[in-house]
Amino acid sequence: MAQKDSLEELLVQAVDAAKSAGEIIRSAFYQTKLVEHKGEVDLVTETDKKCEEFIFNFLKQHYPDHKFIGEETTAACGATELTDKPTWIVDPLDGTTNFVHGYPFVCVSIGLTIGRIPTLGVVYNPIMDELFTAIRGKGAFLNGKPIKVSSQSELVKSLLATESGIKLDKSTLDATTNRINSLLFKVNKCCFIIMFSMNVSGYSSEHWFSYNQVRSLRMSGSCALNLCGIACGRLDLFYLLGFGPWDIAAGAVIVAEAGGVVFDPSGKELDITTPRIAASNPLLKEAFIQALQQSE
């Protein structure tokens, strides 16, 4: 059981694994990549596989009784069930498309669940040398310094992050872009009626007007780094539909420990095995849920 090792010791090992995997990513970042396709736009490289193999072997040496779920092994072998046992959930290279294109928003994401609850998180961007860490109940940190979510309380002044996703069929794309349009701009109809005092007739006119829901939108290409952006106050709002638990297991802990909230876009409690997540600071949560529901 994980109780034999303190959470602090577990974090030390996870950080060592993330930094070593980060060195693999950094050394390959400006080199020619061998790219394969898991889907039409979902990419995997030899670096993804090499990093996952390294992380799993490293952690299994220290914790042979723990369970392991990784993006690449799951893609190759099928879904892996999350149990109550201590489970390492790993995305060895989140932002593979960024990596392929030399865009520096890439990271290693290592999360640990105990009793199915995200308990420890490490997200490391080796290109920008940013290390995000958190232990449940002990705060969140960026390169060893405490971080916290923004104090923004107005939706219209908030910076929103999301991703376009990897499904390119028309119905999915239409739903995605319609949702983004709704979150960026709210359109209302107003009816003006003018009545003349000496005339029974009147005049009515319908006018459509729009206003900003949020200030602007960002798509970084990395779910884990988007969550860390919420945690350190760079972003105010984030949502994503369609992903695996490896994308959020670490980031969810980091957001919560930075004083933020993670939840299902419907407003229900987050289930990391369900591909739906939203995150914000507590001041924006209710307005964000309402905006998300209206965008459905």
Image (spheres, grey):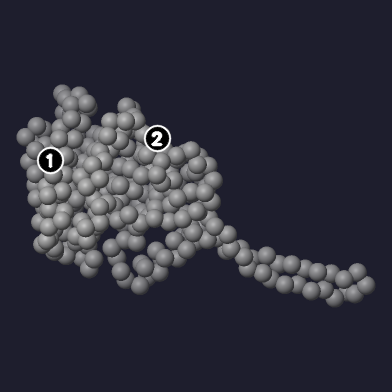
Measuring from the top left, give residue 122's x and y in whole percent. Answer: 24, 38
Q: Residue at x 44, y 61 (%)?
A: 180
Q: Residue at x 30, y 50 (%)?
A: 223
Q: Residue at x 53, y 55 (%)?
A: 213
**10 Å neighbourhood of mark 1: few (<14), some, or many (≥20)?**
some
Location of the N terminus (image quadrant): top left
- Classify mark 1: helix, strand or loop: helix
Residue 232's label in the rendered image is: none
Q: CA distance from mark 1 to mark 2?
A: 27 Å
Q: Is residue 268 above or below residue 11?
A: below
Q: Which residue is mark 2?
A: 148
Measuring from the top left, give residue 44's x and y in whole percent. Answer: 16, 59
Q: In the image, 142: left or right of 208?
A: left
Q: Which residue is mark 1?
A: 20
Q: Say whether residue 269 is visible.
A: no
Measuring from the top left, give residue 225's x and y in whole percent. Answer: 30, 47
Q: Is residue 261 above or below residue 43?
A: above
